[in-house]
Image (tube, rainbow, N blue to C red):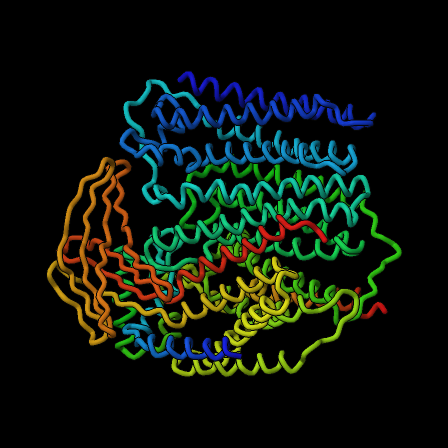
Amino acid sequence: MIYSVVGHYSLILGLCAGLILTFFSIQNFKNSNQLDTKILSFSFLQLFFVLISFLALIISFVISDFSNETVFNNSHTTKPLFYKISGTWGNHEGSLLLWLLVLTLFIFIFLLRTKNQPIKYKILTLGFQQVIIIGFFLFLIQTSNPFNYLFPVPDEGLGLNPILQDPALAIHPPILYLGYVGSSIIFSSALAATTLKMVSTSWAVHIKKWVLISWIFLTLGILLGSIWAYYELGWGGFWFWDPVENVSLMPWLALTTLLHCILVLERKEILTSWVIILSIATFTLSMCGTFLVRSGILNSVHTFANDPERGLFILIFLFALIFLSLFIFFFFHQTTKDNSSNFFWLSKETSILVNNWFMMYFLSVVLIGTVYPIFLDVISSQKISVGPPFYHKLIAPFLIPFLFAMAIGPRLKWIRSDLKDKIYLISLLTISILISFFIVKNFNTNILINTILISSALYLFFITLRDFFLKKYKNFAQNTAHFGFSLLILSILFNNLFSSEIITNLKVGETYDNSKTKIVFESINQKTEKNYKSIIANFNITNAEGINNNLSPELRIYNQPNITTSEADIKTTLMRDKFIVINLVQNQDYFNVRYQVKPFMLWIWLSVIMISLGGLVSFLQRRI
Amino acid sequence: MKIFKNFIIIFLLLILNNVYANENSERNEITKNLRCLICQGQSVYDSDSDFANSMKILVDQKLDEGLSENEIYVYFKEKYGDWILYDPGLNKNTYLLWLLPIFIFLFGGAIIVKSFILKK
């Protein structure tokens, strides 16, 4: 009770700090010889208030204070402490509070760490960031206050959705938000730089670090979500082209484009407008994502807690931000007249443009695929589904030239280049095609497209691998990321082609045998935990090579809320995952058993980690 | 070149290791493209709800009756509407959906060629 009051009032104080900050920054902006110390202290104060408010919410969750509506809706006394804490951001109100915390944290670090930039620029960035922060404060206090009071105080809470009670999902939102919200700094800073007409190479060098931070976190955040979906949603896939997943992919695509584009701007002043548009787009897409997820427009596995009033607020806020940025872009932005865009068609600049071109295409596929059904429904009330086949058909063919460009591009020089050691490039290409043909030949899948796809990914794989040995530490970050990407595509392709599965119904003691795989359903155990009962099934699986595995998938019957979840048991090895999951069949004494062998699963995760590692190396690197 | 040779060997081993034939593979292909109507964003293949299970049986039946994959899609589409198909075919409702990204791609290419390549 007391914590809710503290939390609520610190929120209001935080909002006040925001208003005062805005006032000070306007004053300071007019006569700016040096940064007013008050600005830094109030920015800290704002962060402090939000932090207090956030801690108050965590404490309310830990002590199960059910006079707090958010706690009542999302917690339960029998829940383990870890999930009580993670439950804080496992719901709409709490996750928005986390947004706000990250927003204020980032601007504070920005003010502290930005040294060699003009004072006016710092103040203006703060100003734009405050617009976003104040917007979120109002949104939080108006429509989704995490500290609503309940009376009479209930004895017990409703509990957290069991599928959210998971270690990966406990840290997924904070990491993802660091990425999402990190893009707000890029947004504010791009607007400030545009207004002051200082979009230049030095600005690019400065903002690149922030782009990298958001990018690394966003990549890892998406990875965590995907890992969670893989083992918790219980059907062995890792990417479903679900709207909520798409919504996190869109800012990632925009951010990746921006990251590459900044490489050009770092060296010479071209593409300025494009960099600004991308900076604006990235944050706008993050906001769009929040809008789509929170408003409940989407039909998705991930949508929870939604309310039209909230949707409307975010929509209005979103339009205000877009309008503001367009206004600034058109009134203040000046394109550089001298246009030093003299580069030969075969050069690093061109290859980065090609990257941007394809990335924008992928972005438009994902964006249109996600929102088109909504618009069609509104306009003609026809309901259509846009699922994996759509994305595969539109993305896979374009991936081929994209991968080749990724292999060749980084080898080119700035301004003008020609291809060196052509013999090597061509022989590697031949090898890649041959290997892929051998791999694909044995399967009656679509030979042509798969061969070409695998060869292009293999090509990138070989070229980047060779560069590790040849170039040593030159371009190490880029090479790591590109190598990781080739590994990712290869793993996904092999995973798709070589996965096999057995779906069958078994009773305890029964055996399934199809001459290659033998599944023995040995026994069943029951266990009672604090907040769920579990049924553990023990299987013994023997494959064609005679390798024996014991796997024990689980069914958990949670008491609060009363939901049954299937916990897959996964045996991970370097080359393949063995994945087994059981389900209850109503009114039957047998279980539905789904056993999958999924090659290269581990490599999908490792390659994404490698990609973000590339980002980290680049972040830590000093510019030469 | 030694590394590459090793890679070739590894890949060949993989091939030998993984020649599993999928039972029900045709049914799985089809049910992956059908939406489970009572679930939140799951395909019939992924879901274990009663609805999905009866759909799986229905797909098996239709396959036994000798219907082709496309005929089965048409059958479900007539019964439940476009919502059930994850692959929105090209028709008057979806021209924009399929063609707009392609158009954006061409447009982007045209901009790059015009403003950077031809400018010399």
Residue A127 locus on image (x, y percent): 70, 31
| Front-most of residues B95 and A617 | A617
Please name the residue shown 77% across and 55% down the image: A267
Of all residues, the one furthest to the right in this rendering is A338
Of all residues, the one furthest to the left in this rendering is A509
Residue A11 locus on image (x, y percent): 54, 23
Side of B103 relative to A543 (left or right): right
Give the number of marks: 0
| Front-most of residues B76 and A92 | A92
Give the quarter of the figure containing the N terminus of chain A: top left
Residue B106 locus on image (x, y percent): 68, 68
Task: Examine the image and state in which quarter residue B113 appears.
Answer: bottom right
Please name the residue shown 34% across and 45% down the image: A163
Residue A69 locus on image (x, y percent): 39, 26
Please name the residue shown 72% across and 48% down the image: A205
- Let me know if residue A276 appears in the view: yes
A437 to A605, vertically: above or below: below
- Let me know if residue A371 appears in the view: no
Task: Examine the image and state in which quarter residue A235 appears.
Answer: bottom left
A483 to A130, vertically: above or below: below
Side of A224 relative to A311 (left or right): left
